[in-house]
Image: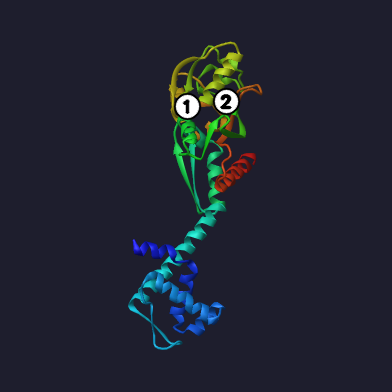
Amino acid sequence: MDALKAIGAIELYHLRYFIVVAEELNINRAAEKLQMAQPPLSQQIQMLEKRLDVKLFDRKNNRILQLTQAGATFLVEARSMLANLERAAIKTQQIDRGKIGHLTIGFTSAMMNGVLPNILLNFRHKYPEIELILKEENSFFHLQKLRDRTIDTIFTYRESGLEKERDLAELILCQESLMAILPERHPLASKLTLTISDLKNEEFIMPDRAIVPGLSAQIYKLCLQAEFTPKVAQSAIFMVTILGLVAGGIGISILPSSVRNLHRTGVVYRPIRGEIATSQLTIVWRCHESSKILEQFLEIAQATAMN
């Protein structure tokens, strides 16, 4: 307890003064180096010894000093304490300025077919010291974790009503056209473009509503606007699974055009006519978030999506 009281009474300048005196072993030279008068420096060293209740120096005379064993030990620890404090200050400043730290990002597997890889690449190139922690999961759990502060931002296909969530902010990065995905020998594959109505008698392979609710809702909306409800033969979590099921003749699907990056054989991609046939890729984060790292990431994401 006495040691803790002594620590509480010691100021940083005591450590700095002590280190210089210990290095010079001459009070006058130390005072000159510290650009202060000799008497107040001597008083501060004596005060430090009193607060520690130890003798740090053997004084052969008023000018020549010798470290005691306790003083030599305290010199090592004092240097370490100041070095640790300096590192802590530098690290804190770098985090505050967005130079180091980490960002946790939620996404679904479908996002990796589009612009997200380029966003990650550009961010890591500009901010190599910032760690990106990627969490692949369905959008429902991402929203929960965003509110629980275990995730900093999420990528999702825009859902209706999200703009009404007062605790969340969103930015639409890009609009991606939707395409019909057909088995390569399907009768409709001979057409260069399709309408939604062309698909009303088909069986659909749907993206899992729990995983990508925004995309699933958009497909249903398109079908309802064409005055039919899609007949769902199967739902699937991953885009590659949906393409495999289409190639196997289980049904057709509607997916964002970035799915073509998967290069699946056995299927054909046909544009859907009409301006409404789009999905919106959105990035979502907590309102009033003060993170400099998040601010930088949003800037990179927007700039990358615009190119």
**Foreground of the two, 194 or 30:** 30
Q: Which mark is residue 266?
A: 1
Task: Identify the element where label 2 is drawn.
Answer: strand
Task: Identify the element where label 1 is drawn.
Answer: loop
Residue 264 seen in the figure: no
**Real-space CA distance between mark 2 and mark 1, rounded to the nearest whole angstrom:** 16 Å
The quarter holding residue 141 reads: top left
Q: Looking at the picture, which amino acid does disc 1 mark?
A: Gly
The chosen color scheme is rainbow
User: In what quadrant of the picture does the C terminus appear?
Assistant: top right
Q: Is residue 115 above or below residue 219?
A: below
**Foreground of the two, 150 or 236:** 150
Q: Position of residue 292 (x, y in %)?
A: 57, 48
Residue sitting at x 43%, y 66%: 81
Q: Position of residue 147 (x, y in %)?
A: 49, 34
Classify mark 1: residues with Cα within 10 Å, few (<14), some (14-19) or many (20+).
some
Q: Position of residue 40 (x, y in %)?
A: 52, 77
Q: Is residue 103 above or below residue 181?
A: below
Residue sitting at x 61%, y 42%: 304
Mark whose residue sits in front, 2 or 1: 2
Q: Which mark is residue 185?
A: none
Badge 2 is on which residue?
Answer: 179
Q: Position of residue 302 (x, y in %)?
A: 62, 41
Q: Which mark sits nearer the N-terminus, 2 or 1? A: 2
